[in-house]
Image: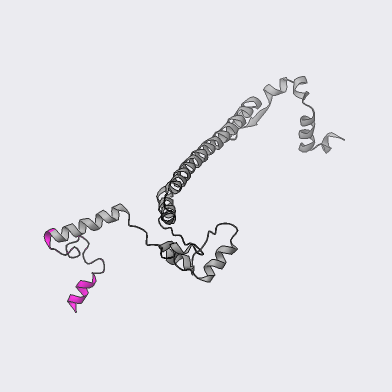
Amino acid sequence: MGVQGITETDIANFLAASPGFFERHAELLGSIQLTSPHGQRAVSLQERQMEMLRDKIKGLERQIVEMVRHGQDNVAIADKLHRWTRALMLAANAADLPDVLVSELQHQFQIPQAAIRVWDGAEVFASLPFARAVGDDVKTFASSLTTPYCGVNTGFEAVDWLNEPALPETAKDKIKEKLAQYKSTNACVYCHAPDVGSKKPPASHEAAAQ
């Protein structure tokens, strides 16, 4: 094969298959100039290798940080699961178990809404909230599941089991503040608000206007 027939791939394959090439031609290592990936300047082969190693180390460091973060998240989930399981095991009354299950699930995992229904249970529990009647569609759907269902809930009977989520403490405080203002001044909160007129008045104003 002539020189003109040699390709870059041929050269790369030769160097990969000849680890002793640069040992026999050590002077080339000091004279080879490469383009830096962080600019247009030329760098030596050794410096280029160092840059590649630094980039690889940075990538490994990011992976380690992600692994640590995931590990911390897993530990936190395991702790919550342990506390939830402990609360269930401490429930002395079987009738209290479903309520404890739901309340602790909401508390430990910060779930705003949760509910449970149990069917075909003992007659002694028939009057309790968790034993309320459910439709045949729900039973069929639950029996068909091999894994927990996660998806849209439109039209599901189970959605009606959920209570309205509680207001955040900040919202509760704001409502209390408005009520306290009204009680102390006997003044309408709407009429004395800074943005009066920019929002729809309450029904009491509309009724008075009529």
Instruction: Report x, y in % for residue 80.
Output: 45, 44
Toward the front, the furthest residue is 124
x 43%, y 64%: residue: 161
Image quadrant in which the C terminus is located: bottom left
Q: Is residue 49 above or below residue 179?
A: above
Question: Residue 4: where, in percent of width, then height?
Answer: 82, 37
- The answer to whether any part of residue 38 appears in the image is no
Q: Is residue 210 above or below residue 172?
A: below
Q: Nearer the viewer, residue 169 or 40?
A: 169
Q: Which residue shows up at 66% across the image and 28% down it?
A: 33
- Residue 147 shows in this picture: yes
Q: Determine the residue positioned at 25% across, 55% down.
A: 174
In this picture, which residue range is highlighted in magenta? 184-210
x and y, in percent, of residue 30 in the image: 67, 22
Is the magenta region chiefly helix, strand or loop? loop
Compare residues 53 and 100 and report the one nearer the observer: 100
Left or right, 113 with reference to 74: left
Q: Quadrant of residue 5?
A: top right
Q: Would residue 53 appear left or right of 118 to someone viewing this image? A: right
- Is residue 166 rendered magenta in the image? no
Q: Nearer the viewer, residue 69 or 56?
A: 69
Q: State yes or no: residue 206 in magenta.
A: yes
| Quarter of the figure that contains the N terminus | top right
Q: Residue 140's quadrant in the figure?
A: bottom right
Q: Is residue 170 left or right of residue 61?
A: left
In the rendered image, the residue lying farthest to the right is: 1
Name the spot of residue 100 as percent of width and height, x first. 41, 52
